[in-house]
Amino acid sequence: MLASALVTPELPSLRPPFALRARVLTPLAAGGTYHEPDGLLLVDAAGRLTFVGAAGDRPAEAATALDLRPWVVLPGLIDLHAHLPQLPNAGLGAGLDVLTWLDRYIFPLERGFDEAAAERLAPIAWRAFAAAGTTTAVVHGAVYEASLDAAFQAAAAHGIRAVIGKVMMDRLTYDPTIEPATILERSLRESSDLIARWHGRDGGRLRYAVTPRFAVSCTAEMLRESAALADSTGAYWQTHLSEDRGEIAEVARLFPDALDYVDVYERAGGLGVRTILAHAVHLSDRELGRLVATGSHVAHCPVSNLFLASGVMPLARYLEAGLSVGLGSDVAGGPELSIFTAMRVGFYAQNAMRVAGLASGPALGPFDWLRLGTLGGAQALGIDDLVGSLEPGKEADLIAVDPAFVASVPGSIDDDPEDLMSRLMFRAHPDMVRAAWVRGRALEGPGARG
Ligand SMILES: [Zn+2]
């Protein structure tokens, strides 16, 4: 199993510029998928890809490249939705409804996520994301400003590409030190200060997302003011939408004038091209139409949706309508960080819909899921000119995967690229990601266990 781990010793010290020789598999921005069994990737001193192609086309560089074969190099995965403070409770609370689960497992945990906890946990979390193959992570923090600074500092040091936001809540909260009368003003000020310190840092590797938790925990005023803050600063705006039936009923009770859940956010000015909405499991046609019309994006979190029995998102219907969709782990609503797992469980969930007669048409294949977990996420973040696929001119956000971990019979190799991707999503192994890079800089985390 670990025979091909022998190629690792040079990896941690690899610095741009460098050349890698490996099997290459990537979606392409123009459509389709590129596969090269004996591929070459050239990364320049700035961490950009200058060549992605066949080793035979550049024999001089190929001869001196670090040879990772039979490993496969893929674009780094993009996790559009996770909760940094919740990692310690990953795997707990299966089957509870969302509002009960928040009360029992999550708010007590986030209440303890102060600066010291963030300093301890954030470096572990960024390494765990990288070990799962995620090179871009979009996360909710907790409510405490200092814990967000610690999370950003850890991301700055680790090298991962990250979008992070301080959770905003003024209708229910877990911070007993905050005066209810000043909570909105304080939360806005702290978010604004964090944007000033972190949004766009390191050439845009670190970005901020204004993060009202969801409509149940925010007043209309907080939703409106948070959206205005995102608008005026160019930060993202992220929240949860339409996760489960109990939550939807509570939103209808709290916002009796709104047409539906999406309308609550639209009235607040929250929809738009820099908006990431997690879940969106139960949308009406009207809601779906408004998300498409406003260019808003959805983080599809199928593992979480089944873990918490929230429902099954009708992905085929959404994609047919033209909705922008990427994948999220939603840790700790989802028990693990792996986006490969999100692909697998998403596939199973869509099959369940088809069996139940709730979806028709051809199933998404392995390449479609790879695209959702890479370019789909990059498009949702508006950074598909930088990452999401392995193409010259883009930044070198890469992962190297050892296919020996997913072989069903030791020593067997899938020559067909779709078969290979099928193994990676359906037989994903926690240790199969052997290296990860952002802008050509190796990230700590992968290979730590194997
Ligand atoms: Zn979430």
Image (spheres, rainbow, N blue to C red):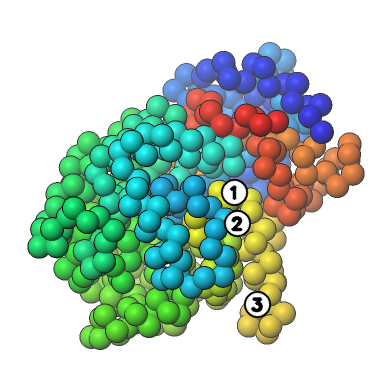
Give the mark, 3 or 1, whose residue is nearer the N terminus.
1
SS at mark 2? Answer: helix
Q: Quadrant of the N terminus?
A: top right
SS at mark 1? Answer: loop
Q: Please, is residue 16 above or below residue 127 in the view?
A: above
Q: Position of residue 241 (x, y in %)?
A: 39, 69
Q: Please, is residue 392 above or below residue 213 in the view?
A: above
Q: Quadrant of the C terminus?
A: top right
Q: Position of residue 87 (x, y in %)?
A: 48, 48
Label 3 vs label 1: CA separation? 23 Å
Q: Residues within 10 Å of mark 1 (few under 14, many from 20)?
A: many
Which residue is located at x 63 percent, y 50 percent? 340
Judging depth in this view, the residue of 148 and 59 nearest the camera is: 148
Q: Residues within 10 Å of mark 3 (few under 14, many from 20)?
A: some
Which residue is located at x 65 percent, y 62 percent? 345
Residue that label 3 marks:
353
The amino acid on which the numbered mark 2 sits, given as a three-letter code, is: Ala
Q: Pointer 2 and pointer 1: residues touching (CB < 8 Å)?
A: yes
Q: Quadrant of residue 180?
A: bottom left
Q: Is residue 164 left or right of residue 178?
A: right
Q: Please, is residue 201 above or below residue 246 in the view?
A: above
Label 2 vs label 1: CA separation? 7 Å
SS at mark 3? Answer: helix
User: For the view shown, which residue lies furthest in the left direction?
Assistant: 181
Which residue is located at x 72 percent, y 79 percent? 355
Residue that label 1 marks:
338
Judging depth in this view, the residue of 266 and 144 nearest the camera is: 144
The amino acid on which the numbered mark 1 sits, given as a three-letter code, is: Ser
Residue that label 2 marks:
342
Q: Pointer 3 and pointer 1: residues touching (CB < 8 Å)?
A: no
